[in-house]
Amino acid sequence: MARIELRGVAHAYGPAPTSDKDYALRPLELTWEDGGAYALLGPSGCGKTTLLNIISGLVRPSRGQVLINGVDVTAAPPQERNIAQVFQFPVIYDTMTVAENLAFPLRNRGLGKAETQARVEEVAGLLELTPDLRRRASGLSADMRQRISLGRGLVRKDVAAILLDEPLTVIDPHVKWLLRRKLKQVHESLRVTLVYVTHDQVEALTLADQVVVMNGGRVVQVGTPQELFERPVDTFVGYFIGSPGMNLLPCTLEEGGAVVEGQRVPLAPETCAKARADGGELKLGIRPEFLRRVPEGTPSSVRVEVTQVENLGRHQLATARLGTQVLKVRLAEEEHLSAGESCWLEFPGQWTTLYAGGRAVP
Ligand code: ATP
């Protein structure tokens, strides 16, 4: 099992980086504890795969050190790191059977036939491949091929860590949830360090104990799914996490409050003072889930016009206009709104964040 540390790791693909922009990965510090489940989450091109490949040894970083269990492996080739990697597109041998593919990573590891077979059967059971063990891999569906690929990553119980690079992208949507659950079970039973790359927040939030959010080659926030949801450090995380993302309303400040389209939302005086000092564009952030319909005149509330209401099973998602600005509101089960009506929405102080220059003001 492995504790993975990245110290000042940065990477530029070009030969001689001259500015920050030349780095696919800006200098970062990260520590992943033994046995944890971590997700790297961010939009396409933000550097997730680069970071994963640096850990596995496929890419040697331009700067910094990679430590596995305290040992500097920055210069070590992949085969010396005892790490399994599963890629977005399945890497399997078409000429072999499913069982032979699963057994492949166990070759030359001094295991007897019986133990090899037992492990193959265990992994096949976990991934629901048992009925297909004797089939040839060629001609199998994309999601079966990816399950075999996952199985090859999981079959070696002695690996220090398993790195997965968007492994569910090619999987049929209705099988995805099953594989997500399987992966979680596998992690819970093996307790191997798991690093999971994805641009899909549902995958990241359901699989990982801790999520590393990246943007533009930088780590922008590291936190539990709950921390990312409740306390996004900047407007990028606020909007990227959540469905829909955080409402971010341009505002101005007056004594003890923010003003949005002429309506006032109280804020702590220290927050206003700090935002003035920080400078930059001001935005008032609140998640659709935290807005509450309240009676007229309730403190910290604003008047809005409801323009659209979507039914999402037990909940409604409303779109409302606050002057020229648009707000999303996820209503609690017992609340109801209709398009065309106006109502008052409360911004609970605990869940309302002021952002100055994109950064949360404490
Ligand atoms: P995706 O989700 O699309 O795979 P990502 O977050 O994994 O994206 P990376 O693949 O790490 O991002 O890419 C980060 C940046 O580095 C991108 O601008 C990409 O174009 C660039 N890049 C990646 N691999 C190479 C390479 N081999 N040579 C040159 N540039 C590269």
Image: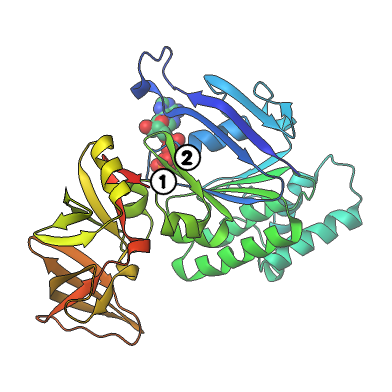
Locate ligand 1 by image quadrant: top left
Q: Amino acid at mark 2?
A: Lys
- Where does residue 244 sit, x and y in percent of width and height? 30, 63
Colour scheme shown: rainbow
Q: Is mark 2 within 8 Å of ligand 1?
A: yes
**Which residue occupies 62% across, 38% down?**
31
Tag of residue 100: none
Q: Residues under labels 1 and 2: Cα distance?
A: 7 Å
Q: Tell me which numbered mark, 1 or 2, is placed earlier along the sequence.
A: 1
- Where does residue 267 sit, x and y in percent of width and height? 27, 56
Screen quadrant of the N terminus: top right
**Can see residue 212?**
no
Q: Amino acid at mark 1?
A: Gly
Q: Is residue 134 left or right of residue 32?
A: right
Query: In the figure, residue 58 lies in which quadrant?
Result: top right
Q: Is mark 1 within 8 Å of ligand 1?
A: yes
Residue labelled with disc 1:
42
- Where does residue 181 sit, x and y in percent of width and height? 60, 67
Name above or below for residue 361 compared with residue 9. below
Query: Within 10 angstroms of label 2, few (less than 14), some, or many (20 or more) residues?
Result: many
Tag of residue 48: 2
Helix, strand or loop at mark 2? helix
**Which residue occupies 16% across, 84% down?**
338
**Which residue occupies 43% across, 13% down?**
15
Q: Is residue 322 left or right of residue 160?
A: left
| Nearest the eye: 231 or 214 | 231
